Every structure is written in structure tokens, then in C-alpha cells.
Amino acid sequence: MIPRYSRKEMAQIWAPETRYKIWFEIEAHAADRMAELGIVPRDAAKTIWEKGRNAEFNAARIDEIESVTKHDVIAFLTHLAEIVGPEARFVHQGMTSSDVLDTCLNIQLTRAADLLLKDIDEVLAALKRRAFEHKLTPCIGRSHGIHAEPVTFGLKLAYAHAEFQRARERLVFARKDIATCAISGAVGTFANIDPSVEVHVAEKLGLAVEPISTQVIPRDRHAMFFAVLGVIASSIERLATEIRHLQRTEVLEAEEYFSPGQKGSSAMPHKRNPVLTENLTGLARLVRSAVTPAMENVALWHERDISHSSVERGIGPDATVHLDFALKRLAGVIDKLLVYPENMQRNLDRLGGLVHSQRVLLALTQKGMSREDSYAAVQRNAMPVWRGEGQFLELLKADKEIAAHLSAQELESLFDLGYHTKHVDTIFARVFGHA
């Protein structure tokens, strides 16, 4: 995680100060319940809150202690004792480090998911606005990168809206799945801590109780969470790649906004490069790079090992920070995207009407020709057009076999662009609803 691709609110979730505040709250809430059970003196639980609630935990001091203890939670508890005083001996009663670490990580991932959901909502809003703006703006649809049949630019954006709506639904599920709490003690048996402590801490921190933990919260939850982030990143890349292709000089149907004073190249003053969507493509790779390690973290030894720990210290901040930045950038790209309907129409016309070949094929079959003969007849007239040797409609009219089945007027009617957009309203209703 580097400042260039970090937004303050998301980065703050992963700051040491935030982590230590969460650690304290977990310990203090646990102490409260233990006081209710008579395990911890009520005055001690009260003192822990009074002295720790507004304390500024010193990350440098904790690091100094950890350099000796070689254990981060013990270093934190030692520093907490420096703040709280003698009552700190009642902190962490019957708990193990993973109770604090795992519950904290899940809180951080839950908060990160909340920010990412807001980001996705911004992307959805931008896509919806621009989709309706260009609902009936015709452009060429491409398969294998080659001109296929007409679509509309609004449909391209509607495709993306539906995809990010699915992304949102997946992230809502992933957030719920990761929002669990484990305060079950060594190897997860509650031998030295009452299960009601776990229930109390979970309620106070807005989490669900982990039904059964070992000494750690099961890592299949985390694998699912990061997998969802990876899929969202892939959706970002798909849309970014579409824009990059549309901005190519030979296409130029859409283009990233180029601000006053912006420079595209240090060598060539004329350049307007798709730098934002190229950046999004790279950020998507970084987010996806967290998925495989998260999957490999699932298989821990017996009731607990720490092979997952170093991984999560990296992928937790990096994946969420990069995805947060990417979603925010994508929303801006869509919101300010320059769209060129004239170029779209010019590209539609580049192949001299070949984009209507399927309609001619189907019309011939309706007139009695076999599909094979119809295909051959249409294709033999299409190939010269590829070579720049005439217009498709005129060649079809001059073909005696075709003329025997379709009149000139009938052929002309098959070249109606509006035919391809007649169900756009139906598709939009499916994506956006009827409102």
C-alpha cells in the first residue's frame, strides 16, 4: 500500500492506531462481561475503560516492547498495563492472541467492505446516468475484435451496470460472512473463558459469533472475502479494457477526459493516452494477487499456526486500499467519459453494410432457400466488400440468385439500423427496473 493509490478513509482502517484501538475495545468489552460473571472486579473493568478509552496508544513504544518480546499482542498488553496500571492484570483473562487478532481483522475487513460498497454505489450511479444518456446511441458490436452487429453505447454501459450490481450483492454476502467474532481461548474450547464473553463482545462490536473456531477463525471466510474482491477487480478491468480499446486512434468512439494542462507524453505533445484505465488494469492485477494467498491460508496446521499471519498483514490493507482507489477512479472515468456518436456512426458504416448480413441470411431462409445456400450467397457478396470492392446492398441487388427471392425494396428494408435497437427498452427494464 503506497500513498499514490491510497485514500485516507480506507488507509486509516489499517493504521496502527486504529488496530490498537480495536484491540483495546475487544479486551475491555471482554473484561466487562467477566466482571458481570464475577471473574474480574467491577472496579477493575471500569478502570480499564476509563484509562484506556481515550488513551493514545504509542505505536513506537509497542514496537520497542515487541523487539524484546517478539510477540505483538504481548507488547500491546504490556503497553496497556503502562497506561491502566495494576488493574491491567485482569485484561486478557482466559483469552489467546488469536481472539484479539482475528476479531480485529474481521472488524477491519467489515469496515473496508462498507467503504467499498459506497464506492460501488458511485460506480453504479455513474453507469446508470451515462447508460440512459446513450441508451439509443448506435455503435458497432464486436466479436473477436471484429465488427459484428449494431448495439448501442447505452447497452455497453448497461452490461457493466448489471455486472457491478452482481459485484455489490457478492460483497454484501462477503461482508456478512467475514463479520464474525471468536473469543474462545486456546484451541477454541472455552476452557478458561465463558462462552458468554464471546457473545457479549460480538454484540458490542456488531459481529456474529463464530459458531466453532479452533484457535483461529476459519480462513475459508477470508478466502471468500478476497475472492470477491478479486472478481470485482476483474470487472473493473473488463470495463477499463473496453474503454482503452474504444480510445484507440483507429476507433476513437470514447475517450477519457483530458483536463486542461494535462500532458500525454514527455516526448510527443499530441498524445492523449488512456492512462486512467491503464492504471485501473494494473490495480486490478494487484487486487487479484491477494486471492491465491488467501486460498492457501485455509489449510492451517491442526488448531492453529501463524503461516497466514504475514500474508494477511499484507493482503488485507493492500487489496482493500487498491480496490477502494480503483473503484473511485472508475466512477470518475465513467462520469467524465467523452463519447463520440459521430465516430460510432462512421465506424458502423465502415464495412459498407456488412453488419446487416445476418438479416439477409435469415430473410433468404424465410423465402425458401436452405440455410447452407443462403449462407453461401450472402458470403460471396460480403467478401468483395471486405476488399473494398463495392457496397454490400448493391452487390446483393445485382446477385441473380438473391434477386430471385428478395426484391430490391425488401433488401433495402433489411438494412434498417433501428431493427437492432427495438428491444433496448426491454433490456434496460431488466437491468434498471421499470421506474
Image (cartoon, helix red, strand yellow):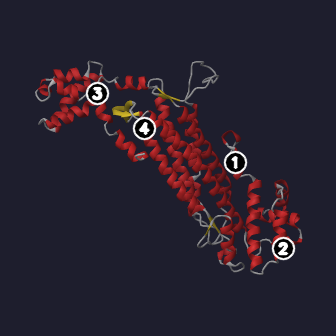
Kindly report the distance in space between the C-alpha atoms of the residues bearing marks 4 and 2.
62 Å
- Please tell me which of labels 4 and 1 falls first in the chain: 1
The residue under the point 26% across, 18% down is: 390
**Badge 1: few (under 14), some or many (20 or more) residues near its Cα, within 10 Å?**
many
Q: Quadrant of residue 365?
A: top left
Of 78 and 299, the residue lying toward us: 78
Quarter of the picture containing the C terminus is top left
- Please tell me which of labels 3 and 2 falls first in the chain: 2
One can see residue 62 in this view: yes
Residue indicated by mark 3: 354
The single residue placed furthest to the front in the displayed view is 435
Q: Secondary structure at mark 3?
A: helix
- Residue 88 at x, y = what percent? 84, 70
Task: Give above or below for 362 relative to 338.
Answer: below
- Residue 162 at x, y = what percent? 45, 46
Q: Quadrant of residue 208?
A: bottom right
Residue 44 marker: 2
Q: Secondary structure at mark 4?
A: helix
